[in-house]
Image (tube, grey):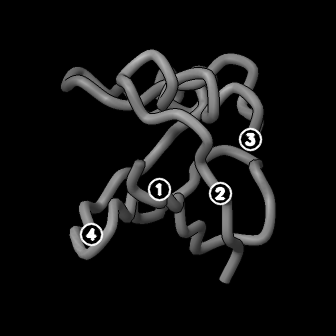
Amino acid sequence: MPEIIYRCYFDDWSTFMDGDLIIDDTTVPYDFVSEKQAKHEGYTHELNILNPFTEDEARKHLAEKGYNNIKFIYE
């Protein structure tokens, strides 16, 4: 099973989290936004919206996409 990492570019989960999903040698930008922030900014395109906006909710979101046992790293 490949190692899966979510590299976070912020120290906490406030209103958005920019990051990368890393699977073995493949890195894909994968950002999250809070539901409140998405409504506030008036986003109309598809986003990775979390409610509540937490690491645990991000873990659930990624598991639903088939990415399990993710290691979160904060940089």
- Residue at figure coordinates x 29%, y 61% from the top left: 29
Reading the image, the residue beneath label 1 is 4
Q: Tell me if 62 is positioned left or right of 59 in this view.
A: left
For marks 3 and 1, give the CA distance.
Answer: 15 Å
The crowd level at tag 1 (other Cα within 10 Å; few <14, some 14-19, many 20+) is some
| Mark positioned earlier in the residue sequence (2 or 3) | 3
* Type of amino acid under label 1: Ile
- Residue at figure coordinates x 74%, y 41% from the top left: 55
For marks 4 and 3, give the CA distance.
Answer: 19 Å
Q: Position of residue 60 (x, y in %)?
A: 61, 22
For marks 4 and 1, give the CA distance.
Answer: 10 Å
| Mark positioned earlier in the residue sequence (3 or 1) | 1
Reading the image, the residue beneath label 4 is 27
| Mark positioned earlier in the residue sequence (1 or 2) | 1
- Residue at figure coordinates x 39%, y 55% from the top left: 2
Reading the image, the residue beneath label 3 is 55
Q: Position of residue 8 (x, y in %)?
A: 59, 67
Q: Are marks 1 and 2 in contact (CB under 8 Å)?
A: yes
* Type of amino acid under label 2: Lys
Reading the image, the residue beneath label 2 is 71
Q: Position of residue 35 (x, y in %)?
A: 57, 21
Mark 1 secondary-structure assignment: strand
Q: Picture quarter containing residue 10?
A: bottom right
